[in-house]
């Protein structure tokens, strides 16, 4: 695996890949890699010739400086996992390589930015788009792979790609879960043993919603799921929504896609999860 820390070295190498007529699959991450990330890499390896992974903890998408500070950064373990997974290229830049200091970024993607996650993390998606746009510009991938766990983020990036007319296909890959149902996340390492047990209520509520889904009872089902989560000790629900998968507004009879999404604080750790209902 080749490791680059500057965009110039990365670009030079990938220009040669392009000249050789090989396709590039890109998996952008913030590190602390788990099987969820590695499943994205596996998809990239299947669908493209050369897989590029980036590890960059992006400061512009954190609302809380303390959250940025405590974000896990086990780079040596991450490199080992990428090598074992057969990744071809790792891009691991310092902040100074990604940001000049006085940059301004704002892309109007409409209300999508302010719904659900956007409401609880104002400015977050501008930071996500800013860094992903930069990374796309450096890597110039044919396909980029993102996890379904961040469903709204995939929508945001797809919107940006459409608005900026970028020549990259966005591929959303299914959520990887622990054996007991917990969605894999880099943040799970912050959960205490008790938190870890309490966190299972999120996937339980989602699965109950999926199995008992009835288009005529959306409001009731949503309240039942919220009540399940609220009854769990050490868990503070932020939202549980049964949403239209194309707009994130409340789902209704006309919704072609329906997704149930949840965000909650379990102990001191904020977790998100979702299931696709149709």
Image: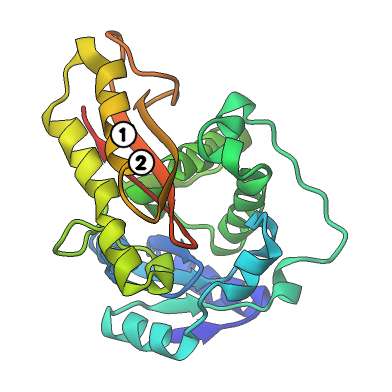
Q: On the rendered structure, is 168 left or right of 165?
A: left
> Which picture quadrant has residue 217?
top left
Q: Pointer 1: residues within 10 angstroms few (<14), some, or many (20+)?
A: some
Indicate the secondary structure of the residue bearing disc 1.
Answer: helix
Place of residue 31 in the rendered image (x, y in percent of width and height, measured from the top left): 47, 73
Q: Is residue 32 above or below residue 266?
A: below
Residue 172 appears in view = yes
- The answer to the question of whether label 1 and label 2 lie on touching residues, with beta carbons closer than 8 A, is yes
Q: Relative to the observer, which residue lies in front, 138 or 53?
A: 53
Indicate the secondary structure of the residue bearing disc 2.
Answer: helix
> Which picture quadrant has residue 166?
top right
Q: Relative to the observer, which residue lies in front, 114 or 204?
A: 204
Q: Quadrant of the N terminus?
A: bottom left
Write the residue at 41% across / 68% down.
186
Determine which of the numbered discs, if any, sits on residue 181 in the image: none
Q: On the rendered structure, is 224 left or right of 125?
A: left
Q: CA distance from mark 1 to mark 2?
A: 5 Å
Q: Pointer 2: residues within 10 angstroms few (<14), some, or many (20+)?
A: some
Write the residue at 27% across / 69% down.
35
Place of residue 62 in the rendered image (x, y in percent of width and height, measured from the top left): 64, 58
Place of residue 101 in the rendered image (x, y in percent of width and height, measured from the top left): 85, 65
Residue 165 appears in view = no
Q: Is residue 200 above or below residue 111?
A: below
Determine which of the numbered discs, if any, sits on residue 230 in the image: 2
Q: Is residue 258 above or below residue 6?
A: above
Write the residue at 25% across / 55% down.
200
Q: Quadrant of the C terminus?
A: top left
Determine which of the numbered discs, if any, sits on residue 227 in the image: 1
Place of residue 94 in the rendered image (x, y in percent of width and height, measured from the top left): 67, 78
Q: On the rendered structure, is 77 left or right of 95?
A: left
Q: Relative to the observer, which residue lies in front, 29 or 220?
A: 220
Write the residue at 70% across / 68% down.
98
């Amino acid at each position: 695996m080749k490791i680059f820390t500057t965009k110039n070295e990365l670009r030079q190498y990938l220009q040669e890949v392009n000249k050789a007529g090989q396709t590039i699959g890109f998996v952008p991450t913030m590190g602390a890699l788990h099987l969820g990330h590695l499943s994205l890499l596996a998809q990239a390896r299947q669908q493209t010739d050369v897989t590029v992974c980036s590890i960059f903890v992006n400061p512009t998408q954190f609302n809380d400086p303390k959250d940025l500070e405590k974000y896990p950064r086990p780079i040596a373990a991450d490199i080992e996992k990428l090598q074992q997974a057969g990744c071809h290229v790792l891009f691991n830049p310092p902040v100074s390589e990604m940001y000049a200091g006085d940059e301004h970024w704002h892309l109007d993607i409409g209300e999508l930015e302010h719904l659900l996650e956007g409401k609880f993390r104002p400015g977050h998606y501008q930071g996500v788009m800013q860094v992903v746009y930069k990374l796309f510009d450096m890597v110039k991938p044919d396909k980029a792979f993102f996890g379904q766990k961040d469903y709204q983020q995939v929508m945001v990036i797809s919107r940006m790609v459409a608005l900026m007319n970028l020549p990259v296909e966005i591929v959303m890959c299914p959520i990887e879960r622990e054996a007991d149902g917990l969605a894999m996340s880099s943040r799970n390492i912050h959960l205490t043993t008790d938190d870890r047990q309490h966190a299972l209520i999120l996937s339980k509520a989602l699965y109950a919603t999926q199995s008992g889904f009835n288009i005529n009872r959306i409001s009731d089902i949503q309240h039942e799921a919220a009540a399940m989560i609220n009854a769990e000790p050490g868990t503070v629900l932020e939202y549980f929504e049964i949403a239209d998968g194309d707009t994130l507004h409340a789902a209704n009879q006309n919704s072609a896609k329906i997704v149930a999404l949840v965000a909650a604080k379990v102990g001191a750790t904020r977790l998100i999860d979702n299931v696709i209902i149709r």
